Image (cartoon, rainbow, N blue to C red):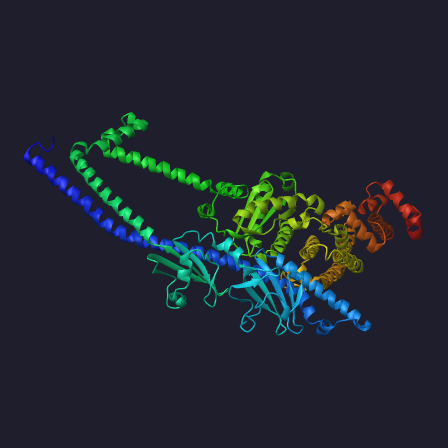
Amino acid sequence: MRLSLSPKRRRFYIKLITYTLLLSLLPVIVLSILFYHNATSVMQRELQAANANYLKQTVNALEVVINQVSNSFRQLALDKVIREFEDFPRGTYYETLAGTFMEEDLPGMYTYLDSKKRLSANLGVFKQSNEFIYSVYFYDNSKQLVMTSDGIEYEKEKFYDKGWDQFAESIQAYPSFMDLRSAKQIGGGSREVIPIVYTSPIAGNYMVVNLDAESIYKSFVSKLDNKSDSAFFVLSGTGKLMLYDDSNALNVKIGASDILQRLGTSLPQSFERDYDGKRMLVSYLQSDFLGWTFVTAAALDDLYGSVSSVKGIVFLAAILLALTTVLLALITTRHIYNPIGSLMQFIKSKDQNFQNGANAAHGELHMIRSSLEEAYGDRESLQVRLKESMPANQEIFVRSLLRKHSYTREEIFERMQYFGFDFALDGIMLMVVSLNEAKAAVYGGVEDENLNKLRLVDRIEQLLPPERKRIVLELADGMFLVMLNCEPDEYKNSFMLAELMITHARQKLAISCTIGIGNYCKDIFELKRAFEEAHEALRCSTIVGTGEVIHIEDVRLEGTPLFVYPHDKEAALNKYIANGEAEEAKRVFADIVKDLAAQQGRVHYHQIEHAFMQLLGSLVKTANGLRVDMNKLLERKNNLYSELLQLKGIPAMTEWLDDTVVRMANRIGTAFKEKNNRHVEQITEMVEQEIGEPISLTFAADRLGLNPAYLSRIFKEKTGEAFSEYVTRVRMEHSKRLLVETEMKIKEIGDSVGYHKTNYFIKLFKDYTGMTPGEYRKMLQPDKMAE
């Protein structure tokens, strides 16, 4: 219909179709060519990256296994069982004894046999420490003796596994990894093993740990080498094949290739080669620790074939696009206004203002613009609300990690970034801080309670090492979560941090809290377990006590006794220190150390460290209550907690705290005496200067800011008489002087000394002197009375 119109209109449509086809198809053709080449290179890079990732995972897994074996060997060496056997006096002599033994040799022989028995048992335990260990040999050169993990010993020449020591001349490192070998079995047959050699400080002695090659292959390699058109194998340090499937011809073919001799030198990490008519992408990774080379190969033909099929799809899509473009050009002019009309119809149906004809005079484009501005405004408002709700969403996300969830590692990482958490997903210490007080009743109101919670979170943030990544937030009312990134060997420091948190919360914020700590998390997926452990530890506070750091292993291990902290003796110690009784304080501290030392060996060492930290915290609290500067008193500039943490061993910490206790008691005792004397002097001056004013013990205590009972006690200790007795005596003595030295009337004298009832004054005076004021004046002023 369009082409049958006038020539002018027809030329317009022909040009429109032609230009539209050129503009649409030319980019498609160019992009198709670029896509084909880019797709092949991208897919090859992805394959290289995947192969490198597989290799890295396998290398890391095997290095972890070897590190576990090495750690077990170090533990065995630390037990000194090997060294005791090697250094045993006359051990070689006892090995040569035969027939009837002389009586004088028997004691040494029994001790030697016991040493050998313990070594044999430890070799068996060493074998069981790792599922990949097939057997363990220990060779003593001076005795020419081979001991095995099966509890059997052999003379070197009679050992059934011939050739086991063929590496003796080539040991250059610790540990040394040998080539794959076939180990003979005691009952016949053989086993493919990978020997690891650990040398002894004594020349010629060494231990051989034989790893089961088949078990390692099934656990780490076979999952990758499961296709006939791919290969995966390991080359030893000498270039020999290890850990491979010999039924796969590609493994043998590629492994025997001369080009592999140049791995790590001139060859890149990935390269292409033809093997058996197949184009293969070969990737490798060398382990500096093991000295092995891990090699994988994948066929590229299928990869490029898939790219070719994609090229056909792109070509077909180009044809369909051309047809679609023709149709589009035909209907463009007629329906060019349709999008605007449809958009206007949609706006009018959704917006009440436009339904009422508002803004119609401004034109359709203005109406569309106004509607879009309103939509964007709504979007910005939603974004603001989302930002305001971010803290709540953060808490919801963290809580979800503490429960069973289906997040992948990538999803967790993405959400961590979205919520603004700078936190690593591996190596995590988790603790739960629980408040012990009764909420608002303690703090004086809900507002004060919430402010104190914020202060506690800030204090925890300040105490955590600044270089450590952390997450600190309130999980529930009175319960806070602390997660900290750390290495396994730094994990025990978290207990000291927890002690500092409790001490600072108590001293700086007057908050009592208990902290439960779960076991170390290797990755983020162990958080649920660690959180449950921390909760379990907190539930044991009824046994251990509140205001403590409770580690799950301290309260959950079967057969491990609970650590008992001497709270009553701690209270007695602080009481003696506050009273300045140095000898009693020193005696009680010795009892505390004795109680703690008695538990050494039955509980974790760090629990005893915590006890010393807790004891220091109570001393600091006592000093703060007495307004004594501990650092100034002890003449120390550094943080007292840091000083105590740096001490190694119970004796050093005991000596440090003993000195602190004695110096505190002596200094506080001296200060108390000086302070008490000063208070008593102030009281006596007050009574003498204000003798006519109504003075009571409560009034004097208020004037000095003291407790009346305390003031009464120190006054009696200093003067030997009660406060009321002293006031009465001073007033009576002053009255006696007035009676003798002045002409004042009895009533005036009573008023001047604070007794406004004359009869009461006369009674007190008579009780004090044995006579009335008149009789006393008459006795001392007879002449004046006569006049």
**177 relative to 711 in the view: left or right:** left
- The residue located at (83%, 54%) in the rendering is 717
Is residue 640 among the parts visible in the rendering?
A: no
Q: x%, y% of residue 608?
A: 70, 56
**285 relative to 481 in the view: left or right:** left
Is residue 26 among the parts visible in the rendering?
A: yes
Q: x%, y% of residue 761?
A: 86, 43
Residue closest to the eye, 431 or 731:
431
Q: Residue 98: which quarter of the image?
A: bottom right
User: Vertically, is 342 above or below 492?
Assistant: above
Q: Residue 590: which quarter of the image?
A: bottom right
Residue closest to the eye, 64 or 108:
108
Residue closest to the eye, 295 or 486:
295
Residue closest to the eye, 458 or 49:
49
Outermost residue toward the left? 7
**465 relative to 417 in the view: left or right:** right
- The residue located at (54%, 61%) in the rendering is 193
Quarter of the N terminus within the rendering? top left
Q: x%, y% of residue 749?
A: 83, 47
Q: x%, y% of residue 557?
A: 68, 49
**522 relative to 152 in the view: left or right:** left
